[in-house]
Amino acid sequence: MADCIFCKIVAKEMNSKIVYEDEKIMAIEDINPVAPVHILIIPKKHIASLDAVTDEDLELMGHIQLTASKLAKKLGLNQNGYRLVNNCGSWGGQTVFHIHYHLLGGRAFAWPPG
Ligand code: 5GP
Ligand code: ZN
């Protein structure tokens, strides 16, 4: 997708710190971390938001969650807990319109978020 930052990162046309990669997804460090661990899990396929997923994406969405769990374990985040966040649409706080999940850890989080 032209002009999509995350498509450029996935295509390695833009630099990022890659934490994990396979044929379907990529996990990178967020450029502006809001927690000691702030990783973005991004599908390689361009999907604008959670609002745009279809039945075709069922396996991919499961793969993202399972990878988040595995990464959290690998990084030891599961000891105290962590947060997996998707921001959908403008009221959801989404700023990059290529679906992604924030894996946040290394500190406690409040609920509900502001
Ligand atoms: P959203 O607000 O859409 O849920 O989250 C977008 C996230 O992408 C933000 O946390 C922001 O810091 C991150 N981000 C935006 N541009 C870049 C970039 O070029 N590289 C990386 N690694 N993260 C980015
Ligand atoms: Zn994209």
Image: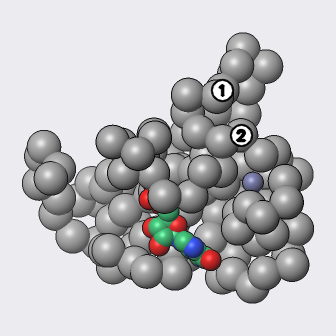
To which quarter of the image does residue 96 belong? bottom right
Q: Is residue 28 left or right of residue 85?
A: right
Q: Is residue 67 visible?
A: no
* Residue on which the image places disc 1: 53
Q: Nearer the viewer, residue 24 or 11?
A: 11
User: 54 above or below 48?
Assistant: above
Q: Amino acid at mark 1?
A: Val
The local secondary structure at tag 2 comes to: loop
- Measured Cα–Cα span from mark 1 to mark 2: 7 Å
Please provide percent x and percent y for residue 50. 55, 33
Quarter of the render that holds ligand 2: bottom right
User: 78 above or below 8?
Assistant: above
- Neighbourhood count class around disc 2 (C-alpha, 10 Å): few under 14, some 14–19, many 20 upward: some
* Residue on which the image places disc 2: 47
Please provide percent x and percent y for residue 47. 71, 40
Q: Amino acid at mark 2?
A: Ile
- Look at the numbered disc 2 and say if its residue's Cβ is closer than 8 Å to ligand 2: yes
Q: Nearer the viewer, residue 62 or 100?
A: 100
Residue drawn at (79%, 19%), measured in percent from left and top?
56
Q: Nearer the viewer, residue 7 or 110?
A: 7
Mark 1 or mark 2: name the one nearer the start of the chain. Answer: 2
Please provide percent x and percent y for residue 22. 82, 56
Q: Is residue 11 visible?
A: yes
Determine which of the numbered discs, if any, sits on residue 98 in the image: none
Residue drawn at (31%, 74%), measured in percent from left and top?
35
To which quarter of the image does residue 109 belong? bottom left
To which quarter of the image does residue 21 belong? bottom right
Marks 1/2 in contact by CB < 8 Å: the verdict is: yes
